[in-house]
């Protein structure tokens, strides 16, 4: 089991992203459940911090407004709706919106057992991963910043959102989510399409 060090919103997010395979799938349903659990752990930190904000403003608000904010704050991440944001300190809005976005993304990922890849696809995946990491290092890209990668993907409108993650072996690395024309698309699907197009050109 993954043991978190100093608990923070980012460490929980990193742990969640670390459960995703390189091809942007989960190896097992339990991995998806664990990833979503980590996001809930991050939300729990924010929820407790937000309650401190409630109590700090209790006298100024009065009991009616305090009760509405305190008891109106959702207990779990999946329960949050737009109407609940009024109950959160604006300082937490950015983190909460990110957690909501990541939860939707992780819920959409498929569960696929690892399967052998062709040498051609494996080589291209290694090339892409190395190029992305080099680009991020050279640009000193910010955490979660989207980077355009059209040239690397033969002109296709591909962008990537990187996350630094730490796995159960305490190894830190970059986990990337890829988007084709703004739509989340597993890297394997993009590379498979590229390989098919390349083969068509070779046989033309």
Image: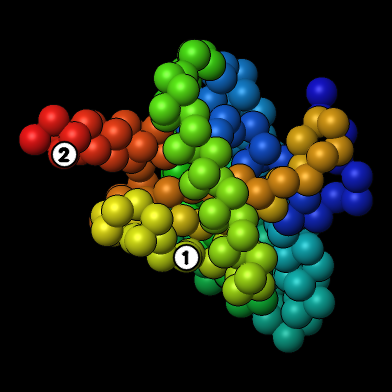
Compared across the picture, whether 46 is left or right of 183 comes to: right
Residue 198 tag number: none
Residue found 78% across the figure and 63% down from its top = 49
Q: Residues within 10 Å of mark 2 (few under 14, many from 20)?
A: few
Quarter-of-image position of residue 159 = bottom left
Residue extending furthest bottom? Answer: 60
Secondary structure found at label 1: strand
Secondary structure found at label 2: helix
User: Quarter holding the C terminus?
Assistant: top left
Would residue 140 be seen by someone viewing this image from the given angle?
A: yes
Compared across the picture, whether 137 is left or right of 158 comes to: right
Q: Which residue is mark 1?
A: 147
Q: What kind of colouring is applied to the model shown?
A: rainbow
User: Quarter holding the N terminus?
Assistant: top right
Counting residues from the N terminus, which is met first, the one under dot 2 or under dot 1? 1
| Residue 102 point in image, percent of width and height | 52, 49
Q: Nearer the viewer, residue 190 or 42?
A: 190
Quarter-of-image position of residue 170 = top right
Residue extending furthest left? Answer: 204
Compared across the picture, whether 88 is left or right of 198 comes to: right
| Residue 78 point in image, percent of width and height | 52, 43
| Residue 94 point in image, percent of width and height | 58, 69
Residue found 16% across the figure and 39% down from its top = 201
Q: Nearer the viewer, residue 196 or 93?
A: 196
Q: Residues within 10 Å of mark 1 (few under 14, many from 20)?
A: some
Which of the two marks, 2 or 1, is nearer to us in this view?
Answer: 2
Q: CA distance from mark 2 to mark 1?
A: 28 Å
Q: Nearer the viewer, residue 84 or 156?
A: 156
Q: Residue 178, relative to residue 32: is it above or below? A: below
Would residue 99 be seen by someone viewing this image from the given angle?
A: no
Residue found 68% across the figure and 81% down from its top = 61
Q: Which residue is mark 2?
A: 201
């Amino acid at each position: 089991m993954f043991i978190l060090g100093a608990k923070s919103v980012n460490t929980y997010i990193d742990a969640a992203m670390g459960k995703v395979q390189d091809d942007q799938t989960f190896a097992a349903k339990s991995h998806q459940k664990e990833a979503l659990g980590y996001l809930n752990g991050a939300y729990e930190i924010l929820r407790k911090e937000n309650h401190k904000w409630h109590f700090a403003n209790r006298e100024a608000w009065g009991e009616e407004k305090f009760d509405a904010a305190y008891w109106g704050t959702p207990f779990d991440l999946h329960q949050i709706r737009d109407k609940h944001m009024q109950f959160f300190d604006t300082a937490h809005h950015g983190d909460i919106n990110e957690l909501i976005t990541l939860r939707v993304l992780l819920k959409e990922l498929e569960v696929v057992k690892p399967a052998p890849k062709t040498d051609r696809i494996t080589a291209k995946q290694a090339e892409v991963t190395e190029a992305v990491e080099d680009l991020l290092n050279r640009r000193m890209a910010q955490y979660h910043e989207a980077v355009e990668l059209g040239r690397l993907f033969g002109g296709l409108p591909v962008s990537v959102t990187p996350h630094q993650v730490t796995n159960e072996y305490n190894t830190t690395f970059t986990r990337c989510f890829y988007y084709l024309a703004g739509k989340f698309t597993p890297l394997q699907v993009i590379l498979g399409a590229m390989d098919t197009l390349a083969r068509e050109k070779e046989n033309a």
